[in-house]
Amino acid sequence: SLIDINCSKLTGDDEGTVTLSINGTTYSTGTGGLGNATSFNNTGEHNATCVYTASQNYTTTSTIFWISVVAQDNAPNTTLITPTASYTNDSTENVNVDFNCTATDDTEIANISLYVTNSDNGSFTANVTTSVNGTTNSSNWTLSLGTGNYTWNCLTYDNNSQTAWGNNHTIVINRTNSTLESNISVGNSSTIHLVGREEHNVTIDSVTATSASITISSTPVTFTISVGETKNLDLEGGSSYDHAVTLSSVSGSSAVVTITPINVAVSSSDTTSTGGSTGGSSSSSSSSEAAAPATPTTPATIPGESRQPAAPSTPGESAQQAAPTTAGEDAQQGRQPLAGRAFWTDFKEIAGDYSTYWIGFVIFMILLIFVFVTVPKVMRRLHTPKKVLPPHHYFREPNTTPPRKYYPRKEQDKKVVKITKRKFDNDLDKEMDKINAKISGLRKGDILPSHKKSFVLQEIKKRSSYDKKLQGKLQDVNNQLQGYAKVQILKEPKDRSLNQKLKKVEKKLSEIDTIGSEKKTFVLREMKERASYNNRLEDKLREINNQLHGYAKLKKPKAYQNKKLIQKLKKVEKELAEVNTINSKKKSFVLKETRRRTSYNKKLEHKYDDVKEKLQKYTKPRRSNEPKDKKLLQKLKQVEKKLAKINKIEPPKKKSSIELREEQKAKNDVKRISKKIEKKRPAPPNELHNIEKKIKKLQDDIRNN
């Protein structure tokens, strides 16, 4: 492009000079106005600088002009190479045609797309798109085209979204079909389209063993043809026959029809009808050129229309009436739809030939449904263990003489709440989350200590009373250690004794955990009958424990207090002697199995450990009470010896099948709970293991603080 650049000096300065330079090259220098017409052929940024040299009282100044030269964006050029324009192929019906297009552009080509119309030369459709690059490129494609007329072209895109088409080229695939064979079922139709002929639909109305009734449209022509026979038809309204129809074979409810294009003049003896003419031939083979017209048959008519006089074959002949129809043909016009009749006929044949199999199939399905419904119920009934009630659940019929009859007691219906495994696990997870939140809150000081027992899980199904009481004892010790039960400043000796007590309780818990892995039940039926007696002992021991801990206000001096404790211990010792007498006669407080213990004996062990530790702590500084304390210790030793006799383990006995089944079930429950709590394998014996860990961690934190 050509640009005229002008520079001039300041008005009134006669001595100053001006210098014009373009892209660093000086073009002219002078005192007057400067001008230069420059042609910029290269794209990019160019600069033109005018420098005014200093003179008199002026300083040197300059002005820079930037000129950007951008190349013109032209559309690409598309050229169609192959196939050439007006390409024709008559060799085969489906032709593989190779397409090639070349594109050129000033900048960068993006892609080339091939567009080909359908066989009737309709609208363009993008067949394939190929991505290319560079300023010159070409693409090749191969498509299979059937008979018809086509138009094709290529569309090119460059990177600037400029597009360009080539010049349209035409393709003609013109193969003359000698014959067209089609297998058609009754009630169905097939479309035929011979080259140089119109498109028609062939429908099979009905078939017999040796013939078929056929309708050809667009203008309907209906006729009956035998196997091997050929019919000449005028389907396109000319003066000659243009199609020859041959019935090749009949199979079941379908027929094989062969259609051949012909060009045979219509003779005067042939009969015409609305929509076309038909003729016959006895030849079993079809001819591509001509077939001799046969003896005229009853003219075919459009269904639903009345027959009309045929047009004269020559101008000199008079119009003649069509031959009268027979009674059978009139009756055939009012027949039911051919497709429905054929379906009903086939169904009757199938039902008649295979009736025995149908009946057997129905019976088999009924038996199969019966088995699927009844077998699961029977299996559940067989695998459900029979409920055996203990003796106290039966009562004797009153006012009867031997033999006595026993009947099961009628228990009140209890509302059973079904707890699924998923709900049980979810509840357990929620409870553990609550415990963790409370522990973290107590550590941080966000939650104040309370009297509520917040470190015990919900009651777990089938857990024994002894297990629950032991958990309560563990929480009481933990509360005392942390100061939750009574807010006070704990002294070091007291903390030490409580730690020792906690260790003993945890040791007992570990023993119970081992027992719990074998079976969850730790109390015999006889324990229920002696609940009141155990409660009295618990109250007495609790009172002693409270006094030793200083929870009850003591108004009497220490000597009187120790004396009172000695009296209470004597009473407890006496009651223990009675228990020993009971156990010597009947082991009602010892379980049958080796690893199971009674709750009563365990409680005595814990309580006497507490008494022993507290006596050692509170009575040691007082010399006046040492003899009495020694006596108490001697009494405690005697009690411990008696407890050891009570806790003698009986030799193991053989377990019954019911006990083994319950024991296995308890093991599975404990494993499942342990997996849920610990999230690892092998799991701890039961869920108390996690609580013990948290309590030990709290103890370590308290010791460190």
Image (cartoon, rainbow, N blue to C red):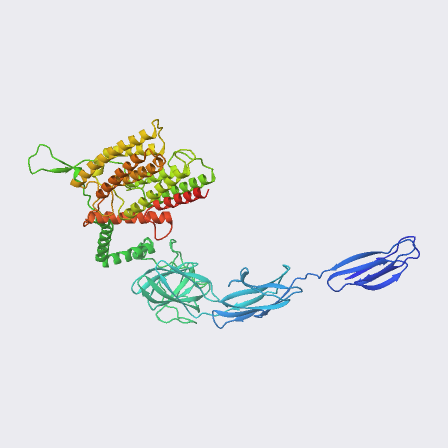
Q: If the image is split into quadrants, where does the N terminus sit? A: bottom right
- Between 485 and 409, the one lying in front of the other is 485
Q: Quadrant of residue 425?
A: top left
582 lies above or below 144: above
- Between 578 and 306, the one lying in front of the other is 578
Please count the marks in the image: 0
- Between 467 and 600, the one lying in front of the other is 600
Q: Quadrant of residue 129?
A: bottom right
- Between 53 and 239, the one lying in front of the other is 53
400 lies above or below 129: above
Q: Which residue lies furthest to the bottom in this view?
A: 91
Question: Residue drawn 37% across and 49% down?
Answer: 678
Q: Which residue lies furthest to the top in this view?
A: 555
Please give left or right for residue 592 compared with residue 427 in the image.
Answer: left
x and y, in percent, of residue 85 in the image: 58, 69
Q: Is residue 412 visible?
A: no
Q: Residue furthest right?
A: 14
Q: Is residue 603 visible?
A: yes
x and y, in percent, of residue 639 in the image: 25, 39
Question: Residue drawn 84% across and 64% down?
Answer: 27
x and y, in percent, of residue 633 in the image: 28, 38
x and y, in percent, of residue 391 in the image: 16, 39
